[in-house]
Every structure is written in C-alpha cells, then in structure tokens.
Image (cartoon, rainbow, N blue to C red):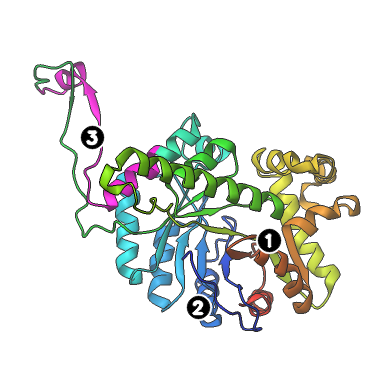
Amino acid sequence: MDGGRAHGGDGVAGVRRGVATTPMEVRREVIVRMAVLADELGYEVFSVAEGWGLDSTVLLAEIATRTRRIKLTSGVLSVWGRTPGTIAMAAATLHQISGGRFVLGLGASSRRLVEGWHAMPFARPAERLGRVASEVRGLLAGGRARPAVREAAVHEAVGETAGSGDRVAARGLRLGQPAVADLPIWIAATGEQTIRVAAEQADGWSSIYLRRDRCRELAAEIRHRRTVAALRTTEDTGTDADAQAAPRQPRPLTVAAGPFTVVDADVDSARVVAAACTAFYLAAMGEVYPRLVSSQGLEAEVDLVRAANSAANRGLGVVPDAAQILLDEFTAYGTAADVREQLKPWDAAVDVTMVALPPGLPWPQIEATLRAAAP
C-alpha cells in the first residue's frame, strides 16, 4: 500500500482515503452498507473497529464477500483478546476470502478494555504487542507456534510423565493453511514504547487523536529507526564481496490517520455531532485519550471538555467554544465543501487519510459524508 500516490476524483495528486468505524458502531448491516459504498466510491481501505460489541473478523468476512476492490483491515484487533494462533488463523482466512485484500491491524488496547472486558491484567502492553505481532508474522510465514511450557508438577497432576526435565512443552504446530508471509500488518501506536514496536515490525502505522504535526514527527521517527536498523543489518550480514553493494532498504511504511468526519448542510448541526463524539472519547472512554490529547499542548482544552461532560452532564456531549481547537484538530465537519477543505491538511500529513465516521449517524448523513470525502 505504500508507494506511488493516485490522483483523486478532484484531480489533485496524492489523495488516498480510507473509511474507519468506531467500536461503538454496532449496526452490522449499516457497516456492511458503508463498506459497499466506500468500495464503489474508490476509497483505498475500509477499517472495522472492535471493542466489546461486534466481532470484527466475522464482520470483515461478510464485507469481503460484498466488495470487490477495497482493502479491508481490522482496526484494530487487541493483542489480549486472541492468541497469536487464532489471530494468524483469522488473518490467513480473511486473506483467502478477500482475495488478498486483508490488512491485519493490531493494537495494545487499553486497561479499561483489557481488564474490564477480557478479564486479563493489563501489564507491559508494548511488550505484549511486540511479542504477539512477531509470533503472528512468524506463523503467517509458515513457522511453528511457540509452545506453552508446563511445570513437571502440572503433568504429574494430570497423570502425565514429565520426562527428564523440570519443564516440558508440546511441539509447536504450524498454520494449517497456505502461508501468507507478505500479509501486511499495521500497528496502532501513540506512546514511545509502542512506536518502537511499530518501527521494528509494522508495514503500516495507524493512530487516533494525534495532531497532524505530531503524526509527521512520529512517522519521521519510525522511518528513521527503520533506516538505521536496515543499515545495521547490512553491516552485520555483509561480506567483503558485498561491500560495494547497495545497502539494504528499510521496509516501506504506510501512515494512516484522520479525523472524525460528518457532513451536514447545517454547520451547527454538524458541530453538535462532532462535539458529541469528541466529548465521549475525552470524558467517557477512560484516561488513554484525554492523556494523549493533553500531552500535545491541549491540557486546558481537555479539562474544559471533561468539566462540561462530568458524570452529571455526560449525556450532553459538549465541547465549549473555548475548546474549539479540539474540533479543529481532530474532526472535519460542516457542508460537503467545508469537509473537503478540512481533509486537505490531513492528505498532506499522512499517506492514507482515514475518514472516521461517528457512531449512530443516520444513513443519509453517512452517505453524504462518504460522497463528500471520497478521493
């Protein structure tokens, strides 16, 4: 997906657009309809989120049978909710169903979702993200699974012979379908440690609630890390005969990010929707997003939103005028012409501008938004 840029429908070079849903959008038939329209309109990728509602892998399988061209990605699968083996099986199966259009999106998730939904301790998330991504890539390439190791006492308790060692393990299995070594893996990352994982392992990097300038900075950092790693690999593996050869090139990186987007002929009504989505993420989704946005010089504005949407007022979905910069940075709203203009800075900042649709929009507004933002 990384490489030359296409010309958008308005004749502007460099326009690559995708569509993204949120975990709160659980109207299955509406999501499928979105994907079909996005496919028809020329979007490059359709991303299905997963949280505590729909199983995105099942939904992506349905979407794959209803679309013909658009790339499909899990945006994202939590590395806590499935084993590396089940992730690899799902990815390889979706690769087959979609005819090679599937992109595997992985993320470290959040404490609230991991502990509150998957009932697992949220410990060393970046380490787990890196380990799972590495194991999944190995399985997709045809390697063996990393077997579980059991103490000898456990074997004795179930009537097994532990053998000569104190610790024993079953032989790791391989994926029981054709290997897909080149299946792209995108990693969602915003923190220093997860960014390092993305630099080391990802074919694509996705993010949410990063200002455009910060997207540029982190993308440059990831690419620099990859270039340095490629040079070191060349030095470590080269021979005298290779001395004059070109250095090993870093793996291409696709950067995908964008704003929550809504079109309405009534700009005030569009702002209400954009504000409600923003307020939900900053006041009702735990501490990850408010901390992330605050760290980018917007702490005062985040505090205003959280105060306006306290427990007593949470249903209001308010972004005060004094916090308007949050909407300017992380949303695109208004008339079709307004939205097209507001997306242009994103096109300049990332490889693929992801048009994120707030949950619960009526279909006419979804269609108007997708048509206005189409490449």
The residue under label 3 is which amino acid type? Pro
Mark 3 and mark 2: span between their CA atoms?
40 Å
CB atoms of marks 3 and 1 within 8 Å: no
Crowding at dot 2, Cα within 10 Å, few <14 / some 14-19 / many 20+, comes out as many
CA gap between label 3 and label 1 equals 41 Å
Mark with earlier residue (3, 1)? 3
- Going 73% across and 44% down the picture, which residue do you hit? 283
Task: Quickly name the residue at label 3.
Answer: 147
- Circle 3 packing at 10 Å, graded few (<14), some (14-19), many (20+), is few
Task: First in sequence, mark 2 or 1: give its number.
Answer: 2
Residue 59 in the figure: left or right of residue 10:
left
- The quarter of the picture where the C terminus appears is bottom right
Secondary element at tag 2: helix
Q: Is residue 46 visible?
A: yes
Range covered by the magenta-colored residues:
131-160
Where does residue 14 sit, x and y in percent of width and height? 60, 72
Name the mark on residue 39: 2
Judging depth in this view, the residue of 44 and 119 nearest the camera is 44
Q: Which residue is mark 1?
A: 259
217 drawn magenta: no
